[in-house]
Image (cartoon, rainbow, N blue to C red):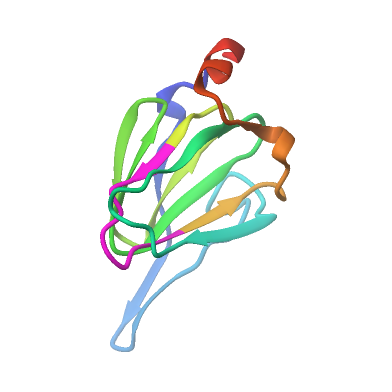
Amino acid sequence: MTSINDCRVIELPRITDQRGSLTVIEGGQHIPFEIRRVFYLYDVSASAVRGAHAHKTLHQLLVCVTGSLDVRANEKAYHLSVPWEGLYIPPMTWVDVFNFAPGSICLVLCSEKYDESDYYRVYKEFLDEC
């Protein structure tokens, strides 16, 4: 199993002036992988749990661009609420995303395109593989 120390919050560059703020994310520079897929979660009810799976080889970065949410990664809890911080999720990390505040948007950057064979969707199968 991935060590819980492998998951980490990454502070992203933030440029702020009188016009507002801008954050940039470049794969391989600000995060430890090249970006090959991007998606985002929104209109998620406060009682819903997203994720509930692990990836065999995929790396991800979760950024709460607005609102707030909680992430449990291999049993360690994280709270995301600012758009200049992302949670790096390495392969072989079981992730649950929950407690979405109303209006929250979670941006997810991925190291690979979608591949169903890369998923563990049953927790026991994930634990057996670890």
Residue at figure coordinates x 56%, y 54% from the top left: 109
> Is 86 on the left-hand or right-hand side of 118?
left
Residue 116 as seen in the image, left or right of residue 31: right
- Where residue 90 appears, as percent x and y from the top left, is 54, 34
Towards the viewer: 105 or 61: 105
Q: Which residues are magenta?
A: 96-106
8 sits to left or right of 127: left
Please tell me whether residue 65 is drawn above or below residue 70 in the rendered image.
below
Which quarter of the image is occupied by the C terminus? top right
**Location of residue 98 (image quadrant):** top left
| 105 and 102: which is toward the camera | 102
Q: Can you name the residue that lies furthest to the bottom here?
A: 19
Q: Quadrant of residue 13?
A: bottom left
Q: Nearer the viewer, residue 20 or 118?
A: 118
Does residue 27 lie above or below 66 as drawn?
above
Q: Position of residue 47 (x, y in %)?
A: 29, 48
Task: Name the residue at the top extreme.
Answer: 128
Question: Is residue 101 inside the magenta stretch?
Answer: yes
Question: In the picture shown, does residue 122 fall above or below 7?
Answer: above
Q: Is 118 displayed left or right of 105 in the figure? A: right
Residue 5 position within the rendered picture, expressed as x and y whole percent measured from the top left:
41, 26
**Residue depicted at x 45% and y 35%:** 95
Q: Residue at x 52, y 17 (%)?
A: 1
Residue 71 painted magenta: no
Q: Position of residue 83 (x, y in %)?
A: 36, 63
